Amino acid sequence: MTPPLSTERLLIRDWTTDDAESAFAVYGSPEVARWLTPAMRAVDDVSAMRSVLEAWVEAQPNLLPPAGRWAVVRRDDDAVIGGLSLRLLPPFEEDFELSWQLRPDTWGNGFATEAGTALVRWAFGEGIEELFAVARPANTRAIGTARRLGMEWVGETDKYYGLRLQVFRIRPSDLRP
């Protein structure tokens, strides 16, 4: 994504391998890992996180826009507090999934909604006609964020990842001013 996206409090930018420790605070956290889908498993240590980031950095230029993975940075202190991604959902790779993961100590501050809204608007500007988010039924935080993003609940399915998931969708006409 060029240039990076910016909101009032956040910067959404490409990951670098220098982000390994900060990324591990997100993807290595048990509170985050319990909700991850098989597309992103928990990371065991900073070294493993660095390897994951290397793969993401290498893959990023080869992904068809708007697909990608990005770091969410808090502007007031330049701290990496989470990640966002847009990727094709399995098994048919027709639907784009928006996903977000934040460090648990930043939950409850509206960062996921703020970052997600910026990425949704950007994706629609790139010509995407709809985006989906999936959440495990007990993941009330993710479901709440999907709703705050303006996403509509469209049902429950086991089509994606072989898990029973709640499915939410947003289209350009659903965007709030």
Image (spheres, rainbow, N blue to C red):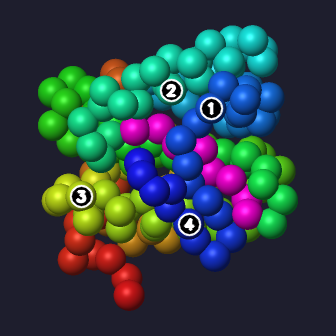
Q: Is residue 115 left or right of residue 34?
A: left
Q: In this view, does 168 lie to the left or right of 111?
A: left
Which one is nearer the viewer's eye here, 135 or 97? 97
Q: What stretch is highlighted in magenta?
A: 68-75
Q: Is residue 47 left or right of residue 41?
A: right
> Can you identify the residue that label 3 sits on?
126
Residue 54 appears in the picture as rendered: yes
Identity of the amino acid at label 4?
A: Ser
Where in the figure is residue 117, as x and y percent of width and height? 46, 67
Which one is nearer the viewer's eye here, 117 or 14? 14
Q: How crowded is mark 2: few (under 14 residues within 10 Å), some or many (20 or more)?
A: some
> Can you identify the residue that label 4 sits on?
6
Residues under numbered marks 2 and 1 in contact, where contact means CB atoms less than 8 Å apart: yes
Which one is nearer the viewer's eye here, 34 or 127? 127
* Residue 16 numbered tag: 1
Name which residue lies at 40% across and 38% down: 68
Identity of the amino acid at label 3?
A: Glu
Where in the figure is residue 98, as x and y percent of width and height? 40, 48
